[in-house]
Each structure stands twice: as structure tokens, then as C-alpha cells.
Image (cartoon, helix red, strand yellow):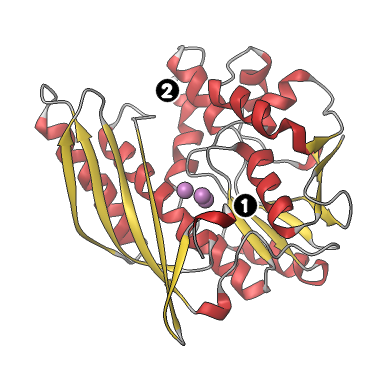
């Protein structure tokens, strides 16, 4: 599986029983604490492996570092990343750094999956329930925090959420026999849901009031703390969306770019309760947010 399917990662079939998952992600700091930035970047990069139903094996650091910056800070970032990779049961195998104006950090990750167990974003079947495993709002809260519109304490739930691996959610989805999955990252809930609808040649109906939100996410959107990425996402993916949410702030929420967001899982209706029970057992703040419908193919229908 390669670049043409707009899926979370590439998959290379090594032999009958082994597929290698390949993915890479890096970005500029979204939190002040260098250790937490490293850990969030790692959780985010690892997420694409979990979204494919795989297990991470090893990762390589990618770092762009301004020459005048404190070397201690770089060590903290790398340590945060390494600890998160270790939590995922994988190892750091090396990496590469360059000097650059803007600090950037992330990882290339390799994972494994049995070829017949790959969970793509193309398998959603009409009648499936859609389960989201993390609340939305990391982009809104990050934007509000940068403008000092919310305090460090108010931002903390977003940081905790971004630090959380999608490993347990991925295990639960495999156990439940999910038909399709993607993780919610830069394109926001509707962008990634739109990619699933297109790849699956089905419609995705989303109940706006069922979408779980971080505390203050709605307030941030109402106060105009909407990231530039949300507007770009709406410009690009808005044409795949039918229906209107009940207010303008809602668009900001539904297109909010997530960092290290949750999994969007398409699961047979008969398995949805089992999946929800298992996610709750793992203390995952998941919700059923809609369903897969036969028409309109390749589109999102907003219900509110
Ligand atoms: Co992804
Ligand atoms: Co992706
Ligand atoms: Co990615």
C-alpha cells in the first residue's frame, strides 16, 4: 500500500505473514515543556502504526535545531520521545539532526502487522457504527494558549490527551473486528472522516452533538481561537460535507487540526457495544459519533 490511497501509513509485504508499516511525522513545538513536546511528537508519529492495526517496532529521530538554542533542551526533547517510544514497546534505532531556523522534532516509525489484518481507511461498510476514541479540541486549546486566552492549567487536559498513546484503542478495535480506521490528526475530524468516506466509497453520517470535546474547546471556538489549519481544512474538505452544524463555532471544532488525536473506527453495529465496553474498561473517553450510510458515496452528512 502506497501513496495513492491517502491512508495513514505505507505497508510493505515482507513475506506471507509479515507486513512492515512505514510512517513519518514531525513538527514545531506545540507545548513549552521540551520533554513533553518530544513525548507528544512521538505519540503522534506512533499513532499511524496503531491506526493501521499494527505494533511499533523501531523509530528514528528527526530533528531540526537552531544553533543558538540550549543543547539541554534538545536532550530533553529526545528523552521525551525515547520514553514514549519505550512505553509503546519499541526502540529508538538512531536518527538525524540538522541545523535550522525553526526547531522541529518527530520520528520515522516502522511497525509490523499481519498482511491480512491491516486495518485501512477503505473498509467502512454501510451499517457500521463510527467510534471516536479521543475528544476533539487540541488545536483550539493550543491556539487559545498561545494567545494567553486560557491558562497553563486549563491547557493541561489537552497536553495529557496528546501524550496518550492509541495502543489500547488499537488493541480494542482489532479485538472487536473493526472494518476501517484512521487517526484524527492535521485534517481534523471531518477531513479524516472525508478520506475514509472517499476510500470506502460510502457515506459517513456524523451526529454533531455526539462528538466528545475537550473542556473549553467550544468556548475557544466561540471566542475565535480557531487555528489557521481549521480554515484550510474547511476550504479543502468542506465540499465533501452535506448539511450544516448548528453554529459557526461548530465548523471550527469539526475541522480543528488535532495533534496526536484519537482513532476513528468503523465497526460492525453488532460489535459496537463490545468495543465501547472495552474502551471504557481502558479508561478511554470514547463515543459513538455516527454511522456509515450507503449514500451519498464519498461524502459526510452532518446531523445536528
Ligand atoms: Co494518520
Ligand atoms: Co496519515
Ligand atoms: Co501521520
Q: Position of residue 16 (x, y in %)?
A: 46, 87
Q: Secondary structure at mark 1?
A: loop
Q: Secondary structure at mark 2?
A: helix
Discs 2/1, front: 1
Question: How many residues crowd mark 2 within 10 Å: few (<14), some (14–19), many (20+)?
Answer: few
Left or right of 149: which side holds 130?
A: right
Specify whether residue 284 is in view.
Answer: no
Left or right of 79: which side holds 132?
A: right
For marks 2 and 1 on the same chain, the one whose residue lies earlier in the sequence: 1
Residue under the image location 67 percent in, 61 percent down:
122
Q: Is residue 114 above or below residue 213?
A: below
Q: Position of residue 2 (x, y in %)?
A: 49, 61
Q: Position of residue 126 (x, y in %)?
A: 84, 62
> In this figure, which residue is indicated by the disc labeled 1?
133
Q: Position of residue 211 (x, y in %)?
A: 73, 41
Foreground residue, 191 or 127?
191
Residue under the image location 62 percent in, 49 percent down:
285
Give how far apart the Cα atoms at labels 2 and 1 are: 24 Å
Residue at the extreme bottom: 16
> In this figure, which residue is indicated by the disc labeled 2?
152
Amino acid at each position: 500500500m502506497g501513496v495513492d490511497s491517502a491512508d495513514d501509513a505505507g505497508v510493505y509485504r515482507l513475506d506471507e505473514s509479515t507486513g512492515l508499516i512505514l510512517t513519518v511525522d514531525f513538527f514545531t513545538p506545540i507545548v513549552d515543556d521540551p520533554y513533553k513536546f518530544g513525548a507528544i511528537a512521538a505519540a503522534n508519529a506512533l499513532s499511524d502504526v496503531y491506526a493501521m492495526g499494527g505494533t511499533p517496532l523501531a523509530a528514528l529521530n528527526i530533528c531540526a535545531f537552531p544553533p543558538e538554542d540550549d543543547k539541554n533542551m534538545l536532550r530533553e526533547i529526545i528523552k521525551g520521545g525515547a520514553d514514549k517510544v519505550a512505553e509503546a514497546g519499541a526502540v529508538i534505532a538512531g536518527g538525524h539532526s540538522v541545523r535550522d531556523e525553526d526547531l522541529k522534532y518527530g520520528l520515522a516509525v516502522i511497525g509490523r502487522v499481519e498482511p491480512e489484518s491491516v486495518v485501512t481507511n477503505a473498509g467502512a461498510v454501510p451499517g457500521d457504527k463510527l467510534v471516536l476514541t479521543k475528544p476533539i479540541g487540541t488545536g483550539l486549546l493550543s491556539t487559545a494558549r498561545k494567545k494567553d486566552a486560557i491558562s497553563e492549567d486549563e491547557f493541561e487536559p489537552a497536553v495529557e490527551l496528546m501524550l496518550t498513546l492509541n495502543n489500547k484503542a488499537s488493541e480494542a478495535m482489532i479485538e472487536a473486528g473493526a472494518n476501517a480506521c484512521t487517526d484524527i490528526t492535521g485534517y481534523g475530524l471531518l477531513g479524516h472522516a472525508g478520506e475514509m468516506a472517499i476510500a470506502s466509497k460510502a457515506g459517513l453520517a456524523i451526529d454533531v452533538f455526539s462528538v466528545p470535546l475537550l473542556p473549553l474547546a467550544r468556548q475557544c471556538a466561540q471566542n475565535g481561537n480557531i487555528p489557521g489549519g481549521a480554515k484550510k481544512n474547511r476550504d479543502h474538505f468542506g465540499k465533501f460535507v452535506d448539511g450544516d452544524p448548528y453554529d459557526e463555532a461548530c465548523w471550527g471544532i469539526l475541522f480543528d487540526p488535532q495533534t496526536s488525536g484519537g482513532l476513528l473506527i468503523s465497526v460492525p453495529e453488532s460489535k459496537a457495544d463490545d468495543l465501547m465496553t472495552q474502551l471504557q474498561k481502558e479508561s478511554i473517553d470514547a463515543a459513538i459519533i455516527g454511522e456509515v450510510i450507503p449514500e451519498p458515496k464519498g461524502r459526510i452528512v452532518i446531523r445536528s
